[in-house]
Amino acid sequence: MSLRKIAFVGAGSIAEATLAGLLQAHVVKGEQITVSNRSNERRLQELHHRYGVHGTHDKKELLAHADIIFLAMKPKDVVEALTPLRDYITENQLIISLLAGVSTTSITNLLQKNVPIIRAMPNTSSAILKSATAISPSVHAKEEHIMLAKTLFETIGLVSVVEEKHMHAVTALSGSGPAYIYYVVEAMENAAKQIGLEETVAKSLILQTMIGAAEMLKTNTKHPSILRKEITSPGGTTEAGIEILKSFQFQEALIQCITEATKRSHELGETLEKFVNEK
């Protein structure tokens, strides 16, 4: 994969996780990445010192000679951010959109040109090369663009190619997924304090438990419900804990959590599409 330059429009957490992963995977060097945001110069300097990437608010400098342009701003800022970039983006460049809920059609209409777009939803585990990423091509993206994006994201984790209509569900499931896991870990750490475990001991036990359970799920063909039942002895400690989770409708809450996140992704996309169509 021979890339001259990658541009990031947006410098938040998903942009940082993605560029950090690409650098760690030796796909590009820091000097080949240029990052921009709305006005936060301090953030650009921070990324420069941390990764050796360039920061700029000059749109022409940002996009000149870029092979790939990552869109990583907040979805609500997409119109404001993309409109001034129209004159600097060409149909020879590949756009990779990391925007939750935003369709490739909306981006095409905003740019007013048939630039190839790959809609992608990685997660922040990109930074450690463990992302779960789904990608979906626009109507103007060719097989070569799909393969380039797939190859790129495979350097920072697992990649699935899906139809764009499924990207809302992907956003809610794996895009937001790490936050749900971190939320569970927060609760486990708080529980450890209440039952008197020392913080560093508790953290190491929790993390290894998470890693071990994930590896069991990955390497074992048994359904999660079977693995759970195998360590839930009648009248035992695990059963006592599971019964409390059931009483609080833990599974139902998690299902509703992912359902609502999917709904919100749809809403973000519909709001933007309506705005673009009215312009």
Image: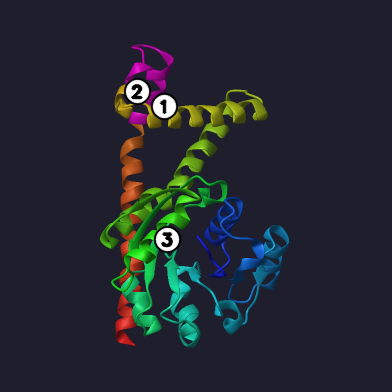
Question: Is residue 25 at all visible to an observer of this figure?
Answer: yes
Q: Which residue is mark 2?
A: 227
Which quadrant, please, contains the C terminus? bottom left
Instruction: Answer whether labels 3 and 2 touch (C-beta < 8 Å).
Output: no
Query: Which sits earlier in the primary sequence, circle 3 or circle 1?
Result: 3
What separation in Å lies between label 3 and label 2 (alpha carbons)?
36 Å
Q: Residue at x 30, y 78 (%)?
A: 274
Question: Which x, y percent locates residue 127?
Answer: 56, 50
Q: Secondary structure at mark 1?
A: helix
Question: Which x, y percent locates residue 226?
Answer: 30, 23
Q: Looking at the image, is 126 positioned above or below residue 76?
A: above
What separation in Å lies between label 3 and label 1 (alpha carbons)?
30 Å
Q: Which residue is mark 1?
A: 216
Instruction: Answer whether labels 2 and 1 touch (C-beta < 8 Å).
Output: yes
Residue 149 is labelled as 3
Q: Dot 1 surroundings within 10 Å: few (below 14), some, or many (20 or more)?
A: some
Q: Residue at x 29, y 83 (%)?
A: 277
In the visual, does 46 lie left or right of 246?
A: right
Question: Is residue 191 at all visible to an observer of this figure?
Answer: no
